[in-house]
Image (spheres, rainbow, N blue to C red):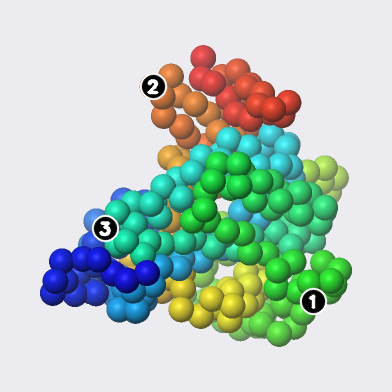
Amino acid sequence: MPLTTAPGTLPTDIGTAILGLLLPHHRTTDHAPPTPAAFPHQLRRIADFVRAGAPIVFTLPGFPCKSPNPAKVLGHLPDQGERLSLDFLDALCARIEEIYPPGARMVLCSDGHVFGDLIGVPDEHIDAYADELRTHMARRELTRLSVFDLRDAFAAVPPATRRAHVQDRYAPTVDALRAELRSDTHTLALYRGITRFLVEDTDGWTGTRSALQRACRQRAYGVIQRSRAWGDLIAEHHPHAVRLSIHPQPIGAAKFGIRLLDTPDAWTTPWHSAALHRTDGTWTLMPRARAARLGRLVQREGRASHFEQN
């Protein structure tokens, strides 16, 4: 589609305006207020699409599967937290289209199969979760969104074979990660955050707390390995895309962290929590057990959906 903007409008100016739409939703632990100029990597990628008059492609690894901990989530299928997040992402692409007619599309790179064995979620639950995301997109006509998962990358082979292929071809070594943890504070924070999630998500552990923490620290290396590998595979399939991240990212990083909904911290996601509809009409995310203390459970289409605050 040809670009329809005022004569003389520069691709960098359009890119700055587009990035300005993303900045209010930047997920980061930095405290300085960001400006578009602080994100040269994203500006270059967006400007490349603008010069070509093409829709901007964003890739967002995430939406893997629900946490296996029943104290955190309502079940193994997407619920109101995911529905609100998908609606938000499609609306964000629609806002981009208002200032840049070729628009934007968002590829949700569902990574549940990549590390399902490490987080204790069966592959059939991961399939059902991703399929339900697609169903919601079709039902709501969220045409700017799509889902990409390991079934798209490697068809007709078992999930374990897909995981092994990704690990063997793309993953960094554990020794390399350990060295990075010693030198990079962001990677260390990511490792600690993933370890915490693994501890919280483990259900039915019968050993000691210290043994659980040791096991989760080891598994956290595997999650980071495969997450990096998944990122490289995505880059092969979508080499020119603007890379988003569900994790907090420093200002100016090559990946742009994006916040989907109001959350109490920079790490909470819809797949680790339940949605609570506040009395003032706003939404937030929190563990199911806490949301249940604050509100009543709402069913939708025969399944638990969210909580309404009392």
Kindly identify the residue that appears in the image at 85 percent across and 45 percent down: 206
Q: Residue at x 66, y 80 (%)?
A: 171
Q: Which residue is mark 1?
A: 164
Residue 292 placement, left or right of 215: left
Do the residues bearing badges 2 and 3 touch, measured as CB atoms within 8 Å?
Answer: no
Whether residue 87 appears in this view of the structure is yes
Q: Which mark is residue 280?
A: 2
Task: Tell me: residue 68, above or below residue 162.
Answer: above
Relative side of 36 to 192, left or right: left
Cα separation between marks 2 and 3 = 31 Å
Q: Is residue 221 visible?
A: no
Quadrant of res 127: bottom right
Q: Which residue is mark 3?
A: 99
Q: Earlier in the sequence, mark 2 or mark 3?
A: 3
Can you give x and y, in whole percent of width and height, for residue 11 in the image?
Answer: 24, 74
Identify the image quadrant of residue 9: bottom left
Compared to residue 68, the image places residue 109 above or below, namely below
- In primary-sequence order, the first of circles 3 and 1 is 3
Please, which residue is most extreme toward the top here?
A: 310
